[in-house]
Image: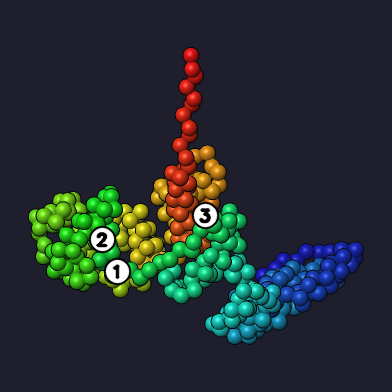
Amino acid sequence: MGFSCPINFDQKARLLSSSLELSKSQKALPPSAARKAPILFFSSHCFTFQIADEKIQQNPTSTPSSPPPPPAAATAAAASKIPFRPRKTRKLTNQRLDPETAAAAFPSRSRRPRILKPLSSDGEIELALGHLRRADPLLSALIGSLEAPTFASSARPFLALARSILYQQLATKAAQTIYARFLALFGGGGGGGEDGEDGVSPDSLLALSPQQLRQAGVSGRKAGYLHDLAENFRSGALSDESILEMEDEALLTALTRVKGIGVWSVHMFMMFSLHRPDVLPVGDLGVRKGVQAMHELKELPKPLEMEELCEKWRPYRSVGSWYMWRLMESKAAAAKAMPASAPAPVQSR
C-alpha cells in the first residue's frame, strides 16, 4: 500500500537524508514493530511511500517492495526477547532466627520480656519486680517499701468461678459463711472444706434446685448465675482445660457471656486464680485510687488514662496493680494510726 509523486533534486536530497535516519531507527526497533514502519522508495523523478504489513499483499507491479515478513513463530520468539527492566526480588526463608539475631533485627520486640508462666511459678515474681523497677521510678520506690506479692495455688477454674459469683457484693465474713453452707450441699459437712470443694461440679450443681441453694443463703439471682455457669461447662462451651489454654482477650470474651460474670470478675479471676501476669483492672476503684495517689492526680484516672499511665508496666501489669492496692491499704493504715487532734483549750472567763 503506498502512493507516488514527482520530486525535484532538492527534495530528493532531503528525502534521502530522512530515509537514512529512518533506516537507522528501524534497526533499533523490535522485528514486530519494524514490519509496520513506513518505508521510502524513490527514483529520479518520484518517490513511493509504502507501509509494509505482513497482512497486506504487495503489488508486484509497484516499485521494489519490502522483504517478505518472517514466519509467525519467529515473530513470537523475537517479541519475547524484548528487554525488560530487571526487578529486585526478596527471597523468603522458613529458617528461624536465634534469640540474639532476632533481638538485633527487631530491637522493639526485645524490650519486653516474654512471659509464658503464671506468677505462681518459681522466679516469676523476681522477674516482674526487676522489670517494674527499671520501667517505673515511682513504682520502684513503692516496691522498696512494701513486701513482695505472693500468688498461692488456687482451685479449679469451675470452682473458682462459682466462688466468685457467691462472693459478689458481700462483706468478706458474710461471703465466707454462705460459701461454707454452699459446700455443705455437696457433702462437705457443716464446715465445708476440701471435701465439699471436690464434690462441686457442673452436674452436681445442676442437680440442686434454686430452693436448695436459697436455703444455703444463696439469692435467687445468684442461683440463676450458678446454673448458667454450670450449663456452659456441661455443654462444652467452657472447660477447665480450655480456660487454662485461652489467651487473655479470648478468655475475657468467653467468660463475660456467662450470666453474672462481668469484666471486673474476669480480671480478678485471671489475676488471683489463674495468676496471669499482665492484667490491668481499669475499672477497679482501689487500683484507680492507687494510680491517682502515686501520680498525684487531681481526679481519678479514667480507663483510657489508666491504660496510658500503666503501659510501662507491661507485661507485668498484674503485679503493678497489686501494689496499687497495697499503697491504698498503707495510706488507710497510716491515717488510722494518726493520733486524734487535741481539743482546743477552753478559755476561762
**Amino acid type of disc 3?**
Cys
Depth check: give the residue in front, 259 or 89.
259
Task: Indicate the colouring scheme.
Answer: rainbow
Whichever of labels 1 and 3 marks the residue nearer the N terminus, that label is 1
Q: For the image shown, how many numbered marks are present on the structure?
A: 3
Q: Secondary structure at mark 1?
A: loop
Q: Residue at (65%, 74%) from the top-left corner?
A: 104
Left or right of residue 43: residue 53: left
Farthest residue, direction top: 349
Q: Quadrant of residue 249?
A: bottom left
Query: Which label is found at residue 310?
Result: 3
Depth check: give the residue in front, 192 or 106.
192
Q: Residues within 10 Å of mark 1 (few under 14, many from 20)?
A: some
User: Gap between marks 1 and 2, in whole Å?
Assistant: 10 Å
Q: Nearer the viewer, mark 2 or mark 3?
A: 2
User: Gap between marks 1 and 3, in whole Å?
Assistant: 29 Å
Task: Point out residue 271 in the picture as x, y percentages from the top left corner.
Answer: 39, 62
Depth check: give the residue in front, 80 or 342.
342
Left or right of residue 5: residue 221: left
**Amino acid type of disc 1?**
Ala
Task: Point out residue 21 in the picture as x, y percentages from the top left corner.
Answer: 83, 70
Q: Residue at (44%, 69%) from the top-left corner?
A: 119
Whether 324 is drawn above or below 234: the answer is above
Q: In this rendering, does residue 311 appear at all?
A: no
Query: Which label is found at residue 163?
Result: 2
**Amino acid type of disc 2?**
Arg
Residue that badge 1 annotates: 155
Q: Quadrant of residue 5?
A: bottom right
Q: In this rendering, does residue 297 appear at all?
A: yes
Whichever of labels 2 and 3 marks the residue nearer the N terminus, that label is 2
Left or right of residue 166: residue 6: right
Q: Nearer the viewer, mark 1 or mark 3?
A: 1
